[in-house]
Image: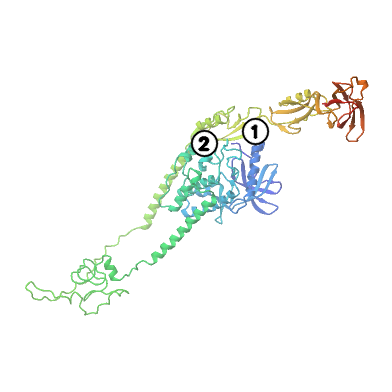
Amino acid sequence: MPSAPDLSGSALDNRYELHAVIGEGAFGRVYAGRDRRLARAVAVKVIKPWWTEDPEWVATFEREAQLLARVSDPGIVQIFDVGHAAEGLYYVAELVDGENLADRLRRGRVPAWEACAIATQLCRALGHAHARRIVHRDVKPANILLSRQGRIKVGDFGVARLAEGSTDGHGLHSPTIVGTPRYMAPEQGRGLPTSPATDVYSVGVVLYEMLAGSPPFSGVSVVDLALSHLQEQPPPLSVRLPSSLVQITGRALAKDPADRYADGAEMADALADARRRSAGAGRARVAVSRTRTPAHAPRAALAGAGFRDGAGSRGPGLSGGGAGSRGPALSGDGAGGRRQAPGPDSAPPLRPHQPLASDTAAPRRRPGGSALPPRRPDATRVAPELSPRRNVNPSARRRAAAALGLVLGLVAAMAVAAVALRPAARTRVPAFIRLDRSGVLAAAHRAHLTIRFGRRYDAAAPGTVIGQRPRGGARVAKQSAVQVMLSRGPAPVPVPGVADGSLADAKRSLTSLGLRVAVRYVPAPATSPGTVVGQQPVADHSAPVGSTVNLSVAETPQWRPVTTFQSAGSGTFRIIGEHWRLAYNMGFQGTCTWIFWCSGPTARVIDATTGQTLTRFGLADGSGQVRTFATGPGTYEIKVTPGGDDARWSARVQDDY
């Protein structure tokens, strides 16, 4: 990839100071800067110099700025200005104080409900764009900015399109697939039309990465990633995550756009609802924990839970030990027993000489039946003495632990250094010159390289590779990017004006520029035959080399019918050419046999504009007569006056053009 000059320290248009590079994309570099006029911090994106040679890239840059200006929302980076300085095209936007989500994810997974909050704000911002029929098409962590105030901002609408059912706005299938493969929806990877559901899928990938710590798919190549998104299901998320977030992520990652949320607003509502339900459930759990049984429960409840009381207990009693007790009592005992203060639910304490309940029950009997004296309670047992305290040395143990930690740290550092210093897998760059786009992609796939295409005008056939960087044969790390320049064909040439000249001169002028000529002969009154009277494209327009210029050329004039009238009629007509003629026929009936004995019909030619009679003549000449006039263009009328005998006649007007 060629290296663009670092413009840090300069000022665009003597207004926007460029302080430091804060980001870089395929064709633009972003600087943190300052607007001198308004005294505020701004972000300035400057297009890389080699893209200015391609009008398509310039149009892409301008479209990005226009789209950013259209989607004014607190969750979308706002644009302030667009300009074209000597250093290149640029636009000025707000500077977000914080980091992007990609930097945040490098520190590990995002807690579930923090990820939910980020995704909710992201979907709200995208929903605002979707409502204006704009699809971002490149949602990824690097384009999601996290401000220090906890707000998110969506940036880089450079590949966005109006949601008109196509990937590129010009058809159902696009020859160019745009986006980032790791976050690209299945239909986007196949070049099919995009929609707001396309952005929903990308948000699903981002949400999955926040919850799991890594994206759902991580193929080695672009093709592997695209196939994974098309055919594979993402690995299941941890069962410890909230089920509502897992379900929302799964729906957003549906292969079919119809199975996802319709747009960002609908997914934002689902995330917000999941968070509300989780908060409500948490409050309910706190309320339940506060109503649980206290530590000092009534004895009846303790007995029901499996604790024994009174006579016959086999372990330490919780209230008092009777006959057969095998351990010390915890609340009251006989003579010599220790006492404890009674709890709120305990039995009343025993007086010093009050007999135990077990003593006042049935007296004990000898085998012969005589009574035995009552049993005295067991004396309180004395606990054994503690063993002698060992003489330990905490400072020595701490020193040993620190030494062990240092050794382990050094071993880990050496392992990391060994991995970092291990040479990356290398590959040889193929020679792409004279290949077409598909050939380049196939060769790059075999060599494990990524391709970034550019286009410029060249004499080579359109779509043919005319340059690459690095050159063919160079050895680079696998997955490196190679810049490949495709020919757009020869540059358009300005079409000269050839109207009013001869056809021969026009052909020489156009063919010398590499243009083709198509001729159509047309009537052109008062114009010399062979004169060019029109052209398409017109003068001063540009046309690709090899395209056709259509010429209209004056043809040789010929007689063309204008109107016909007969017997006792007259007509008004319009003449275009310089000459016109009247062809007429007449026949007699009755006694008139010779034309000099008859008084036949007469005709007058009148200028219809002025009413002036231009000429008068008789029609008694007979049949098949022609009279030619040189009046020039205009509107004329012929009036015929019948003669003194019975005659039939007809006349037709013909124009010469």
- Between discs 2 and 1, the one toward the N terminus: 1
Q: How many marks?
A: 2
Q: Percent x, y for residue 258?
A: 50, 45
- Tag 1: residue type? Arg
Q: Looking at this view, is 175 or 158 the one in front?
A: 175
Tell me the quarter of the picture where residue 496 sits. top right
Tell me the quarter of the picture where residue 150 sits. bottom right
Say which residue label 2 marks: 479
Name the quarter where the C terminus is drawn. top right
Is residue 5 something one can see in this rendering? no
Mark 2 nearby-residue class (10 Å; few <14, some 14–19, many ≥20)? some
Question: Up-down: is 288 above or below 258?
Answer: below
- Tag 2: residue type? Gln
Question: Up-down: is 227 above or below 585?
Answer: below
Say which residue label 1 marks: 456
Disc number for residue 135: none
Q: Horizontally, is 550 left or right of 148 in the view?
A: right
Q: Mark 2 or mark 1: which is in front?
A: 1
Give the residue drawn at x 65%, y 29%: 489
Q: Looking at this view, is 341 or 637 the one in front?
A: 637
